[in-house]
Image (cartoon, helix red, strand yellow):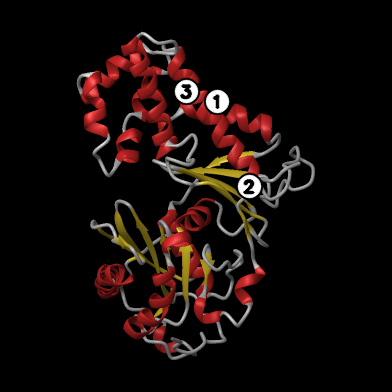
Amino acid sequence: MTHGAPPADPAGPGAYVLGVDSGGSGLRVALGRVGEPGPLASTVCAEPVRTGPGGIDAGHLLAQLLPAARELLDRAPADAAAGARSDGASAHEVAAVAVGAAGMATLGKRLRAELPGALADALGVRRVALAADAVTAYAGAVGQRPGAVVAGGTGMIALGTDLKEWRRADGWGHLLGDSGGGAWIGRAGLDAAMRAHDGRRGGSAALLDRLRAVFGPAEALPGLLYPRSDRPAVLASFAPEVAACAGADPVAADILRQAAGHIAEAAAAVCPVPAAPHGEAGEDDGADEVALTGGLFRMGEPLIAPLREELARLLPGARVSTATGDPLTGALRIAGALAGGDLRLPRHPTMLSVPLEQEPGQLGEAAVQDEPRVG
């Protein structure tokens, strides 16, 4: 299904754009303008978008997104310059929409098939970008410069680009990876607590005390944990307890050092070029920038300090930064760049697609590499 190619001319400054972030905690929508930083307004739909056998439910996403978008547009001030715009656009026309969704890469087939036409019909928008949440996290953290981002929360994924291709490491879920993420740290902390309960080597009495304070008797933990469908989140809820114990407990501190090592290895695997010492190649082009984003890094110095040490060892000269924008900011930035004809992030069939602008064969031009770089 197609609704025509996007206009050849980019939207001018002041045109409205929408950024959408769909994650496990719900759907967030932000309204912005081309050429202006940050959102004008945003809203939250608390119900997470459903996922079923066919992947992410496009109808459920649209049922929340469209009313939210209309509410934001109704509340927005009319573009005083709209009457003077050469393209004749109405004051509240949406020039572009960017949707970032958790699971887009593997579960987003229905979104890619249904959203562009539905948004064109409902909002008249002809520029639509569909992105994995790691891509919107990248855009929020780094913008459109080459570099790398580590997005850490319950899980952990690293993504990097030289603006020609994407490189990904981890993000494979708590059973296959997400090494160093919140669920990984929480599980390691609970393992150490259970070892102390049993009298096995590697146990931590401090973490056992915290287990009992949070969950109750240690022997009851399996019955509390295993039936839960949200086990990764439950495991991750114990990660702050590990960080709180790290200052006085060597077992907890070692868990965070191991987590830092995993995170740094993922960042090194996706950096687009070997980081050079400052003052040499790449200082100003951002290619050796590693941005940290997500709730995992709110644990602060118990994790950040060993992570900086590991990054300095694996990526000497890399500039480590804290993200200034979240995935919703990233979606808004992608929408603004798309509307303005300046989207420089590489297209990819599942990571970042712009369906209405693509010609046959265009999807194959940009690749994503899942294997860590060697050498």
- Residue sticking out furthest to the right: 280
| Mark 1 neighbour density, 10 Å: few (under 14) some (14–19) many (20 or more) | many
Q: How many marks?
A: 3
Quarter the N terminus occupies: bottom left
Alpha carbons under labels 2 and 1: distance apart: 20 Å
Seen in the picture, residue 157 relative to 303 is either above or below; the reply is: below
Q: Earlier in the sequence, mark 2 or mark 1?
A: 2
Residue 37 visible at all: no
Residue 306 has which mark? 1
Which callout, 3 or 1, points at the residue further toward the start of the chain? 3
Q: Are marks 3 and 1 in contact (CB under 8 Å)?
A: no
Where is residue 7 drawn, in percent x and y? 52, 87
If the image is split into quadrants, where does the C terminus sit? top right
Q: Relative to residue 220, is residue 258 drawn left or right?
A: right
Circle 3 Cα neighbour tier, 10 Å, few/some/many (<14 / 14–19 / ≥20): many
Residue 225 vs 79, above or below: the answer is: above
Query: Residue 197: x percent and y percent?
Result: 31, 12
Identify the residue under disc 2.
270
- Asked where in the image residue 108 lies, by quadrant, the reply is bottom left
Which SS class for mark 3? helix
The picture quadrant where one finds residue 269 is top right
- Seen from the viewer's position, the closer of residues 370 and 135 is 370
Marks 3 and 1: which is nearer the front? 3
Q: Secondary structure at mark 2?
A: helix
Q: Which mark is residue 137?
A: none
Q: Residue at position x 37%, y 29% from top?
A: 239
Q: Which residue is mark 3?
A: 255
Q: Is residue 285 left or right of residue 296?
A: right
